[in-house]
Image (cartoon, rainbow, N blue to C red):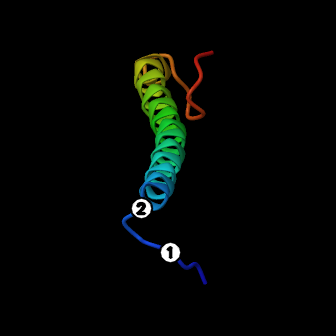
Amino acid sequence: MCFGNSDSPMAIAMNMGIIVMLVVVAGVLGGFASFFIYLMRRARRVAAQADPVETGPYATSEGTAQ
């Protein structure tokens, strides 16, 4: 248990340090999440561009032209 004045500059600085660390961790996690969302969207876009070739008039049931 900590004793001391909760309005002291040391306590305020400690609270601000905790907030800064939480913001940094949230920023890094947000960066990872946005990167994987970008990869999923890019994969969908590439798959959508490849679909017309696979469903063309010479496509077989496997989706590749012979």
Q: Which quarter of the figure is the C terminus placed in?
A: top right
Q: Which mark is residue 4?
A: 1
Read off the residue under disc 2. Answer: 8
Above or below, 53 against 18 in this view is above
Disc 2 element: loop
Residue 60 is tagged as none
User: Residue drawn 43% across and 51% down?
Assistant: 16
Q: What residue is drawn where x is 46% and y is 16%?
A: 53
Image quadrant occupied by the N terminus: bottom right
Image x and y of residue 18, in percent: 50, 55
Outermost residue on the left side: it is: 7
Judged from the image, the secondary structure of the residue bearing numbered disc 1 is: loop
Image vertical order of residue 36 relative to residue 49, above or below: below
Residues marked 2 and 1 touching at CB (< 8 Å): yes
Count of numbered circles in the view: 2
Spot the residue most to the bottom.
Answer: 1
Amino acid type indicated by mark 1? Gly
Looking at this view, is 44 or 33 the one in front? Answer: 33
- Residue 49 percent location from the top left of the image: 42, 18
